[in-house]
Image (cartoon, rainbow, N blue to C red):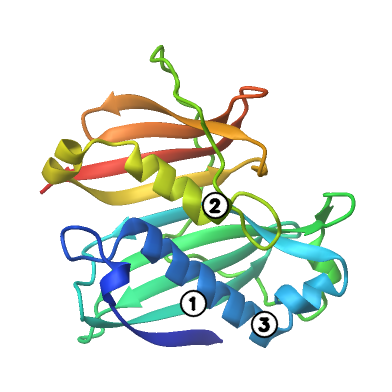
Amino acid sequence: MKHINPITTKSYFINRFGKLSTSFMFYQMQEIAWEHANLLGFGYNQLKNENQFWVLSRLKVKINRRPEWTENFNLETWSRGTDGFYGYRDFNFTDAAGINIIQATSSWLILDAGTKRIVRLSKFKEFPKYAESVFGHNASKVKSPTSDEPLYFTPVLFNEIDINQHFNTGRYIERIIDNYPFNFHEENELTEFEINFLKEGLPTDRLAVKKQQSDELNHLCSVVRESDGADLIRAHLVWKKR
């Protein structure tokens, strides 16, 4: 069963080029995922009653083009079932002509709020059956970047903490995008990204972005915690020339 939302690209969704920003692209996917999980009986409130919560583990996104300011588009999502631990969910952004303009696949886990241990999704008898993704594969493991550049650590900000009292997953994306200078964004546009969410960020953390250029348009990034040097997320970014 697919869940579909009609969306208008509002002024606060867009970047300086008048197109849907990467962070709001993610926030729209996050929101419709919560909505659909609620409809399926596995949403935030249902899990909270069991002292459990969803966490996003992996995400892969391919961007053909971005909706422009005031453009209408549809965002559809569906659960692809589980292999026991991961719950899989895919997304399609389609324009007014019904053409897929952005596609994504994601992998989620349910954690016990007390023990932080993974809850096996096979325990949920009515969870949808496993099906193939829009890409024919799931989001994969991303390597940690290597770099000798000094890291600039900054505190976690109030607006970067989510309802679970952890660093908001979308804010990681914003930190990485904002780490690139204006002139880089003027010349290049993000066309594909794959992210692994590895550890919880907390309000007391200080974080920095580490980058490695595999080549001019393929980059590995991570958000690093100062206290233990751990990668909280790792990302593979693919850019194209504007």
Q: Are marks 2 and 1 in contact (CB under 8 Å)?
A: no
Which quadrant is home to the N terminus? bottom right
The residue mark sitting in front, 3 or 1, is 3
Sequence-earlier tag: 2 or 3: 3
Residue corresponding to mark 3: 38
Label 2 element class: helix
Examine the rendering and report whether any part of residue 168 can be seen: no
Sequence-earlier tag: 2 or 1: 1
Sequence-earlier tag: 3 or 1: 3
Report how far apart the C-alphas of labels 2 and 3 lie in the structure.
Answer: 24 Å
x, y percent for residue 90: 49, 68
Label 3 element class: helix
Q: Quadrant of residue 63?
A: bottom left
Res. 160 mark? 2
Residue in the image at 20% along x and 86% along y:
97
The residue mark sitting in front, 2 or 1, is 2
Q: Quadrant of residue 188?
A: top left
x, y percent for residue 68: 19, 72
Label 1 element class: strand
Report how far apart the C-alphas of labels 3 and 1 lie in the structure.
Answer: 13 Å
Count residues near mark 3 (Cα–Cα under 10 Å), then give few for <14, some for 14-19, many for 20+.
Answer: some
x, y percent for residue 231: 58, 31
Examine the rendering and report whether any part of residue 130 can be seen: yes
Task: Name the amino acid, label 2.
Answer: Glu
Res. 77 mark? 1
